[in-house]
Image (tube, rainbow, N blue to C red):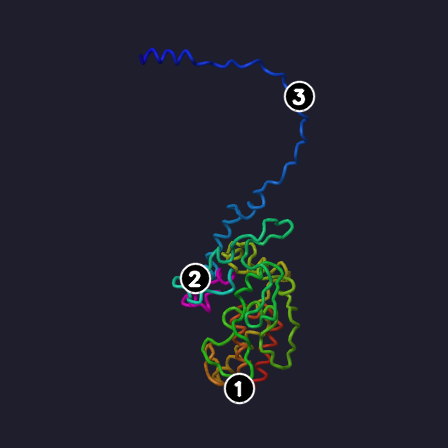
Amino acid sequence: MVITSGLIFIQCTHVSVPGPQGVAGVDGIDGVNGVDGVDGASSCEGCHSDSHRLPIESSYPYSGHASGSTVGSAGSRAACAQCHSNEGYIEYMTFGTTNPEGYANPTRIDCITCHGKHETFDFENDGHDFALRNFAPLALITDPSYTIDFGDKSNNCASCHQPRTAPPVDDGTGMFAVTSSRWGPHNGPQSTFLEGIQGAQIAGSESYPDIGSARHRTGSSCTGCHMGDDSGANDGEHSFIPTSTSCTSCHRNGIPDEVAGLADNMASLAILLEEIGIVHEGQPVAGDYTITQAEAAWNYLLIIEDSSDGIHNPGYAKALINNSIEVLN
């Protein structure tokens, strides 16, 4: 019965036979060929290629940032971490503040500290932002009413390379209290010194140059001097060590050995400050001093902390130091 039923069902199936092919339609009109676009990867490869990255990776280990010396205990403190640790700087640039609890395991300044993501990828119209975390002008920490604008990627340097305290101010009795051996413009006053501001401008025989008039301010930049092509002496690029070619591109007659007379005057001022007791072996000494003594000490520490031996702003350096010597004498 099962077999018979199966045969019945097989006989009931029906196979469809397709009809004849229809008449073919008329071909459409060919479209216009599009114009080939620019290779989307070409603008990326300029930076994201081995030929560009290798000099960066080979020069960076020679920089002070890479040494990790900037981290230390300061990298863990909320008040210092914005410039002394990778984590603190990223959070400060992103949120405008650091973690109030500090950082348990801060790490050194690295590629991702200064470089994050591009603002846009329209480099032709918007300019190349190099994915820097801060490309824009910035208000000073000690004076938010004053904005420094170096006009290029050097603004990222100024984010940290600026003083954390302002010059001394008379307490109303002609005195000033130095409360810590860490008093002074701290380790990063390069941007304001280059600008020609925030020194204690003591009156004297030396006149002070106009703000922003230094030749290194008007004719160069942080990156222009400190990130030149590697000369083969472990300098330039991301070592941030100026090369001789960076200097001779402007100083056609050779690189100046020093700011004339500044080293001798710094030594003379150091002796006077040591006698007063406000400075000992290049470090401030806590105590109560006259405002004049405090201003002279501030100027001395400013030149030391700037670390350029006055080269960033020679005219300003000479005026600050010479007038400080005069007033103490």
304 relative to 101 in the view: left or right: right
Q: Which of 130 and 90 is in front in this view?
A: 90
Question: Residue 317 is drawn in which quadrant?
Answer: bottom right
Q: Do the residues labelled 1 and 3 touch (CB within 8 Å)?
A: no
Up/down of 37 relative to 5, above or below: below
Q: Is mark 1 on a helix, strand or loop?
A: strand
**Real-space Cα distance between discs 1 and 2?**
39 Å
Residue 322's spot in the image, x, y percent? 59, 79
Residue 173's spot in the image, x, y percent? 55, 88
Image quarter (top left, top right, bottom left or bottom right) of the N terminus: top left
- Write down the residue under mark 1: 175
Residue 7's spot in the image, x, y percent? 37, 11
Q: Nearer the viewer, residue 195 or 106?
A: 106
Going from N to C along the chain, the mark reached first, 1 or 2, is 2
Give the residue furthest to the left.
1
Q: Is mark 2 on a helix, strand or loop?
A: loop
**Real-space Cα distance between discs 1 and 3?**
99 Å
Q: How crowded is mark 2: few (under 14 residues within 10 Å), some or many (20 or more)?
A: some
* Range covered by the magenta-colored residues: 68-93
Residue 215's spot in the image, x, y percent? 64, 66
Which mark identifies residue 68?
2
**Callout 1 amino acid:** Met
**Callout 2 amino acid:** Gly
**Real-space Cα distance between discs 3 and 2?**
74 Å
Up/down of 300 relative to 255, above or below: below
| 199 part of magenta stretch | no
Which mark identifies residue 82?
none
**Callout 3 amino acid:** Val
Q: Do the residues labelled 3 and 2 touch (CB within 8 Å)?
A: no
Q: What element carries label 3?
A: loop
Which mark identifies residue 26?
3
Going from N to C along the chain, the mark reached first, 1 or 3, is 3
